[in-house]
Structures are given as C-alpha cells and as structure tokens.
Image (cartoon, rainbow, N blue to C red):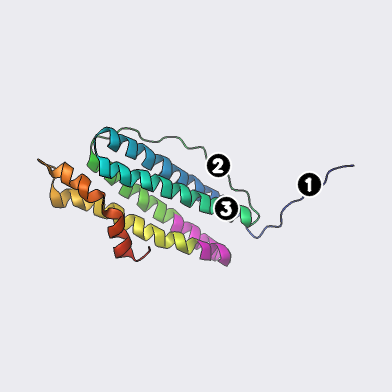
Amino acid sequence: MTKQIITPTRSLSKEIEQLLNHQIMMEGKSSASYLSMASWCESQGYEHSSNLLYSHAEEERGHMLKIFRYVNAAGGHALQPEITGIKNAFGSLREVFEDVLKHEIQVTISINELADQSFKAKDFATFNFLQWFVNEQREEEILARRAVEIFDLIGEEGVGLWMIDQELGKLEAYAAKVSGVK
C-alpha cells in the first residue's frame, strides 16, 4: 500500500510566504545581533545596557516565532534561517546603540514592505497580522532613537558613560509609555 502524502490547504501565496520567511530571517538576525551586543556590553561592565539588550534578544526571538507559527498555520512552511555575519566587537557603547537604531530602521522598512505586498496581494489576513509588527516597530524605533539621544544629552566624559548605562536601563518603560504600544 502506497502512503499518500497530504498537502496542506494553503491560504498563503508562495510570494507572501517567501517574504514572511525573509522577515523571519531578519528577526532571527536581530535576536542574534542583540545577544552579541549584550555580551559585549556585559564584558565591558555596562550592566544595564546588557540587560536591556539580553531582553531585546529574547523579544526578537519571540517575534521570529510569532511569524513562524503564522506561516505554518496558514499552510506555508516557515524556514529556520541561517544566521551569519553577526558583529561581535564594538568601539564604544554609543556604537552599539547607533547600530541598534540603524538595524531597527531596516526592520521597519522590511515590515512596511511586507505589509504593502500583502495588501496588494489582497492577503488581508496577513496584512492584519502584520499590524502588530507595524506598531511594535514604532516602539522599537522610539527606544533606539532615545538611546542615541541620551549620549548627546548626558555626554560621555567623566561619569557620563556610567550615567548613560543607568538611563539605558530605563528605556523600555519610556518607549512603551511614549508609543502607547504596551
């Protein structure tokens, strides 16, 4: 008796599935990048910054899993991305958070493109699903932008870096309050 392979019924186009898998890769790379940044900060004595980045590494992994489950539930196949090219050394704490801001802007652009493509494809379920990510990215950018601003506000001389590290530990609450997301 030949075993019949059952193909799941799809509500997700191959094109949107491919774009969602690309976003999975971006979220996975975000998680790995933040983990690397957290490790560097911790090794440099920036306790609050490392805690913030460890937390964000987990959050980004959660974003990746959320998309993973969505793709599979819609009849697609979520793919575990190969993640390479993660930066492990930084010249300064400021560089870490400037990289965070650049990266979050790239993720925002990618999410917006994905939402636009799902709308054009009349995949309104995916478009609706992505609205959570659109709002989440607003908070992520607020946090990253504020982190970079703190360096200019406090200054890095004397005890400045210590004070900056203290303030960076408070950013999640600030971003949630300002963005209204959480």
Residue receiving disc 1: 5
Residue in front for this viewpoint, 87 or 109? 87
* Mark 3, secondary structure of its residue: helix
Q: How far apart are the two marked residues, 1 and 3, measured between alpha carbons?
A: 22 Å
Q: Give the amino acid at mark 3.
A: Arg
Stretch of the chain drawn in magenta:
111-129
Residue receiving disc 2: 80
Residue 108 occupies quadrant: bottom left
Query: Percent position (x, y) of residue 175?
Result: 30, 59
Q: Earlier in the sequence, mark 2 or mark 3?
A: 3
Q: Give the amino acid at mark 2.
A: Gln
Residue 48 occupies quadrant: top left
Query: Percent position (x, y) of residue 84?
Result: 45, 35
Using a 10 Å C-alpha cutoff, classify the residue at mark 2 as few (fewer than 14 neighbours), some (14 to 19) or many (20 or more).
few
Q: How far apart are the two marked residues, 2 and 1, measured between alpha carbons?
A: 23 Å
Q: How far apart are the two marked residues, 2 and 3, measured between alpha carbons?
A: 12 Å
Prevailing secondary structure of the magenta residues: helix
Q: Is residue 13 visible?
A: no
**Vertical placement of 112 versus 88: above or below?**
below
Residue receiving disc 3: 69
Residue in front for this viewpoint, 30 or 47? 47
Is residue 103 inside the magenta stretch? no
Q: Is residue 7 left or right of residue 164?
A: right
Look at the image and tell me in which quarter the N terminus lies: top right
Q: Give the amino acid at mark 1.
A: Ile
The residue drawn where x is 21% and y is 47% is 166
Residue 30 occupies quadrant: top left
